[in-house]
Amino acid sequence: MTRRMSFGLIFTLLSRNVFAQPKLGDEEWMRRFRDFVKIFNTFVEALNDGNFDVSRWRRMQSAWKELEVE
């Protein structure tokens, strides 16, 4: 019985830390948001110059997906 409880406790603690995603506004999410803003700005600067850069568009899309929070 004690082993089952300890395995359950260990699994619960590990799952919180290992499988945790960044939450809106926490430090990791803010870092990702800053990265997204930098990538977004380079994309918009290229648009202002009259260039649609597909590689920048794709980088912006992938950076946006990293911001998704459940």
Image (cartoon, rainbow, N blue to C red):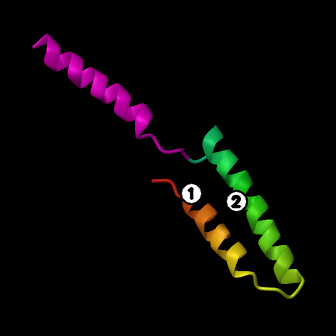
> Tag 1, which secondary structure?
helix
Q: Nearer the viewer, residue 50 or 67?
A: 50
Point out residue 8 in the picture as x, y percentages from the top left corner. 22, 24
Q: Residue at x 81, y 67 (%)?
A: 41
Crowding at dot 2, Cα within 10 Å, few <14 / some 14-19 / many 20+, comes out as many
Image-based side of 70 in relation to 61, left or right = left
To which residue does mark 2 refer? 36
- Residue 9 located within the stretch drawn in magenta: yes
Point out residue 65 in the picture as x, y percentages from the top left corner. 55, 63
Residue 60 image-quadrant placement: bottom right
- Is 29 drawn above or below residue 2 in the view shown? below
- Is 12 drawn above or below residue 1 in the view shown? below
Residue, far front: 55
Q: Residue at x 68, y 53 (%)?
A: 33
Point out residue 18 in the picture as x, y percentages from the top left corner. 42, 35
- Residue 24 located within the stretch drawn in magenta: no
Whether residues under marks 2 and 1 lie with C-beta atoms below 8 angstroms apart, the answer is yes
Q: Residue at x 40, y 40 (%)?
A: 19
Q: Residue at x 75, y 67 (%)?
A: 40
Image-based side of 35 in relation to 44, left or right = left
Distance of label 2 from label 1 (alpha carbons): 9 Å
Image: magenta residue range: 1-23
Helix, strand or loop for the magenta stretch, by majority:
helix
